[in-house]
Amino acid sequence: MDEEIDELDAYFDKKGELTEGEAVKMEHVIMEKVSINPARRKLLRIVGVFGKTEEQLKEESGLNDFFFKFHMDFLLKEGFLKLEEGMYRLTDTGISLHDSVC
C-alpha cells in the first residue's frame, strides 16, 4: 500500500530546508547577534588566538555564572567557539568575526 503524501505534510517537509540565500541570511543574523553584544565580543576577544580555560574566561570577563553560561552556550552552539582539551578556542568563523569586531 502506498501512502499518499498530504499537501500540508509536503509543505512542512519542504519548509525545513533552507535555500542558499536563506542560509546566508541566517548566518548574518547570528553574526549580528554576536557583534552587537558587548559581552560576547569581550569573550571572543579574551579567548583570542591562544585560547583560554573556563576559569580564565570567567575571571577575565567578570560575568556572573548565569551570564557566562548563557553567552558561552550561544557562542559554542553557533560555532564561534569550540572546547578542546579543556581550552576554549576560536573556530574559523570565530576567527573571522574576531578580526572584524574585536
Image: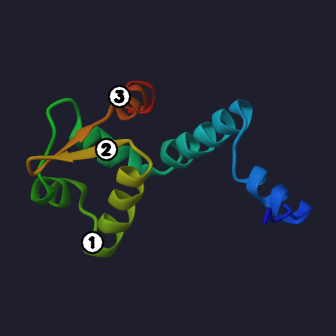
Q: Position of residue 87 (x, y in %)?
A: 12, 47
In this view of the protein, which residue sits in the foreground, 12 or 25? 12
Q: Residue at x 85, y 56 (%)?
A: 11
Per the model, the C-alpha gap separating discs 1 and 2 is 19 Å
Give the mark, 1 or 2, whose residue is nearer the N terminus. Answer: 1
- The reply to whether callout 2 and callout 3 are in contact (CB within 8 Å) is no
Residue indicated by mark 3:
92
Q: Position of residue 52 (x, y in %)?
A: 14, 45
Against 50, residue 69 (above or below) is below
Q: Residue at x 28, y 36 (%)?
A: 90
Per the model, the C-alpha gap separating discs 2 and 3 is 9 Å
- Quadrant the C terminus occupies: top left
Against 50, residue 60 (above or below) is below
Q: Residues within 10 Å of mark 1 (few under 14, many from 20)?
A: few
Residue indicated by mark 1:
64
- The reply to whether callout 3 and callout 1 are in contact (CB within 8 Å) is no
Per the model, the C-alpha gap separating discs 3 and 1 is 27 Å
Q: Residue 26 vs residue 71: left or right?
A: right
